[in-house]
Image (spheres, rainbow, N blue to C red):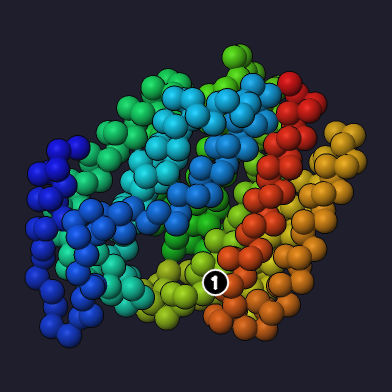
Amino acid sequence: MRETGLSDAVTRRKPVVQGRRVAEPLSKIGLFIRFLKPVTWIPVIWSFLCGAVASGSFGWSDLFGTKFLLAILLTGPLATGTCQMLNDYFDRDLDEINEPSRPIPGGAISLRGATTLIAIWSIFSVIVGYLIHPLIGLYVVIGIVNAHLYSANPIKLKKRLWAGNIIVSVSYLIIPWIAGEIAYRPTFTLQNLAPSLIVAGLYTLSSTGTMTINDFKSIEGDRQVGIHTLPAVFGEHKAALIASVLINIGQLMAAIYMLWLGLMNYAAIVAALVIPQFLLQFSLVRSPRTMDVRYNAIAQNFLVAGMLVCAFAIRSVNP
């Protein structure tokens, strides 16, 4: 992208309503990076890596190959960044309540500027996806459509209790995992993709629980505008309990699937990785709003480690 285009987009400010808390001044690049939410890139990159490992054709040398570098660019700042910008664009009214310092409600990025950035980034995402594999270009389109379904009226799946978290989990797990398989498998069929689809689906169930934990910080705003998240509907403690059950069930079912494949050692490791998460969930259920960030910061490490263990397991039986 030309620097002038980025500069114009992030400096066309809309009027700031009196009394609104304005975001701290950032450089144009810093503001743009904040708009892309880099912290959200990591799970998608990791899911792609798991799919690549599961393919049986990914090795250490591929970590520095052009294909993998393009994949990091795609699954990080491009595709995931596009979806995050879309979410901010469509959630600007909600962010007025929950996060008024975000770039759009804070007045740092205008709606016209946001639209321009989203359009450019969407095109770049599809092109890079196609360069990795033509089918992945199609996957990128599906991911962007999912982002619209999640955030945009009149459908706005995030209003519909389970639907919002499920579609985000699918976009964060199943789509990039299978994209990783497709990128590195010389030939692929539904049969040899089946183990990855099953495991990614089970971890999508767990991820639906972790997405619920992210909703605790915005309960008030969600209730005011009619967003039916689990915490907004069931209250903090019940929602935390439901989330914990989902997180554990998905991973334990993945361990059972490893057993079914005859991979006892892998199954034992995946099951063992649930134990520290289970112990942390006692504190989470007692005090969801004070423990949500700490829980995710610690427990997520064990969950994603289990994903990679499963990827190596699939690699061992489905080379």
The reply to whether residue 35 is visible in this rendering is: no
Spot occupied by residue 281 in the image (x, y as percentages of width and height): 71, 72
Mark 1 packing: few (<14 Cα in 10 Å), some, or many (20+)?
A: some
Amino acid carrying label 1: it is Val
Label 1, secondary structure: give it.
helix
Q: Residue at x 27, y 33 (%)?
A: 123
Q: Quadrant of the N terminus?
A: top left
Q: Is residue 21 above or below residue 266?
A: below
Q: Residue at x 83, y 42 (%)?
A: 266
Q: Is residue 118 above or below residue 142?
A: below
Along the horizontal axis of the image, is 207 left or right of 11? right
Spot occupied by residue 290 in the image (x, y as percentages of width and height): 56, 82
Q: Is residue 118 above or below residue 71?
A: below
Q: Residue at x 73, y 40 (%)?
A: 310
Spot occupied by residue 136 in the image (x, y as percentages of width and height): 45, 27
Q: Quadrant of residue 73?
A: top left
Q: Quadrant of residue 208?
A: bottom right
Q: Quadrant of residue 194?
A: top right
Q: Is residue 110 above or below residue 182?
A: below
Q: Which residue is mark 1?
A: 293
Q: Quadrant of the C terminus?
A: top right
The reply to whether residue 293 is visible in this rendering is: yes
Along the horizontal axis of the image, is 82 left or right of 23? right
Spot occupied by residue 43 in the image (x, y as percentages of width and height): 53, 49
Q: Residue at x 37, y 45 (%)?
A: 77
